[in-house]
Amino acid sequence: MIAFKNVNKWFDKLHVLNDINLEVAKGEVVVVCGPSGSGKSTLIRCINRLEPIQEGSLIVDNMSVHDKKMNMTTIRAEIGFIFQSFNLYPHMTALENVTIAPMKVRKMSKPEAEELGRKTLTRVGLGDRVDNYPAQLSGGQQQRVAIARGLCMQPKIMLFDEPTSALDPEMINEVLDVMRVLAKDGMTMIVVTHEMGFAREVAHRVVFMDDGQIIEVAPPDDFFNNPQTERGKLFLSSILKH
Amino acid sequence: MWGFYFNELMNSLPFFLKGLWMTVAVSGLSLIAATIIGFVLGIMRAGQNKILRYGIGAWVDVTRGTPFLVQVFIIFFILPGVGIELEAFPAAVIALSNMGACFICEIVAGGILAVPQGQREAATASGLSAYQQMRSIVMPQAMPSIIPPLVGQYVLIIKDSSVVSAIGVVDVTRVGWLTVQRIPEGLMVFGLVGLLYFSICYPLILLSNYLERRMSVEKTRL
């Protein structure tokens, strides 16, 4: 479904992605973890070309993402992207937030899009909040609207960039619950997160990154119980200590 | 004597109203053109293309860094030297439109750039085109910070239009100059001129204040 082949990326002189090779299969849930500044977010932002890459190839659903001739709308429509800071459109209600892309990109009619929007908002537990503006919703609710916004495009892949990092602790679970259900339904997901409990429970594989490189790729039980590298051990001890 | 001049002045009132009409025509045409051009330039100035961004920036700096009277003279007296002949009226409209467009360009670009980058990223990620993003996501959020200073800019355009009397456009300022030669009561004559400007600017100032208050309420939602 997603294949990185020898991907390299620089911000000026900083080598943010260093020879990345990674394949993610259909229906697979991959959690990416690592210290901050290790290139986790950049890695998933390349998948829908929010960031360009300088070397290598990146294939998503048989389409070459960084090919200049590629029509990005087609690819982006297949990929839902969830941001740390939600990025809901503040001037639109929850329902308008989730229906604008289906109408403008998928060319769905308004009633059709609204029916889908209501159904999807209900699915994330916000069926009674369709007419609220983002400012009237809690952080956890806003992030669930954002997930519904992604789902309304009926994507093949969902990418999550630290979806719970900006949330108060008591709201983290309501978002993770929605993601658990998605994973069980067979969505292909890449999740950048520090929620190690979620990773253990839901992920098929954990990717550990440091310094722009993929250091380890392993099933969660293996990685958490028995990391193979020094850097992996160091990272795990630093996050599990507190 | 004062009473006599006052009567004379009242008799010239139709002349003043004609001048006022000219002021309204020059500044009205200019502010329409300035708004359209200013928005187009502002959107490009806030865009990705570096050549457009710096090109427009340089032009705005030149316009803002030179006196308006000098700009009017350049367009009216110097352009004919390179073969571009203009009547006073179109020269005045061009000069005013250019100046207004440059200020409006900065207002629009500022409003657009104040919309958080994450808004564009979210829209990009869901597949919206650059035009769709501008229309449905960016502009609706930028407008509350654009509209109040935009209306304020209209007031400046109307007041600055008095400068074009210098190239012979018979606007209300020019009417004042012509009248004061007949009625040598400067305070009285230009008091009337000022009053006429004020009568069209004041409603706009009130509108700008009102919009400022309404938009700040609007912005609390954003």
Image: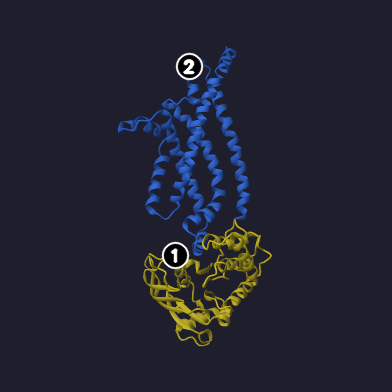
Chain colours: A yellow, B blue
Q: Nearer the viewer, residue A217 or A116?
A: A116
The relative height of residue B219 versus residue A217 in the rendered view (above or below) is above
Q: Nearer the viewer, residue A45 or A209?
A: A45
Q: Chain of mark 2?
A: B
**How many marks overall?**
2
Q: Nearer the viewer, residue A5 or B216?
A: A5
Image coordinates for residue A236, horizontal then vertical, percent: 52, 81
Image quadrant where one finds the C terminus of chain B: bottom right
Mark 2 vs mark 1: tell me if same chain: no
Q: Is residue B190 visible?
A: no
Which residue is at a point 57% across and 32% down the rendered structure image? B200
* Closer to the eye: label 2 or 1: 1
Cα–Cα gap, marks 2 and 1:
70 Å
Image coordinates for residue B136, horizontal then vertical, percent: 54, 55
Query: Within 10 Å of the Cα at label 1, are there few (<14), some (14-19), or many (20+) other Cα atoms?
Result: many
Q: Residue furthest left?
A: B82
Tags 2 and 1 in contact by the CB under 8 Å rule? no
Q: Is residue A205 visible?
A: yes
Q: Find residue A110 and report its image quarter.
A: bottom right
**Amino acid type, label 2:** Gln
**Amino acid type, label 1:** Met
Image coordinates for residue A177, horizontal then vertical, percent: 62, 75
The relative height of residue B221 versus residue B200 in the rendered view (above or below) is below
Q: Residue furthest right?
A: A128
User: Label 1: which residue?
Assistant: A72
Q: Chain of mark 1?
A: A
In the picture, the disc for residue A228 is none
Image quadrant where one finds the N terminus of chain B: top right
Q: Secondary structure at mark 1?
A: helix
User: Label 2: which residue?
Assistant: B181
Image coordinates for residue A50, horizontal then vertical, percent: 46, 65
Which residue is at a point 53% across and 17% down the rendered structure image? B185
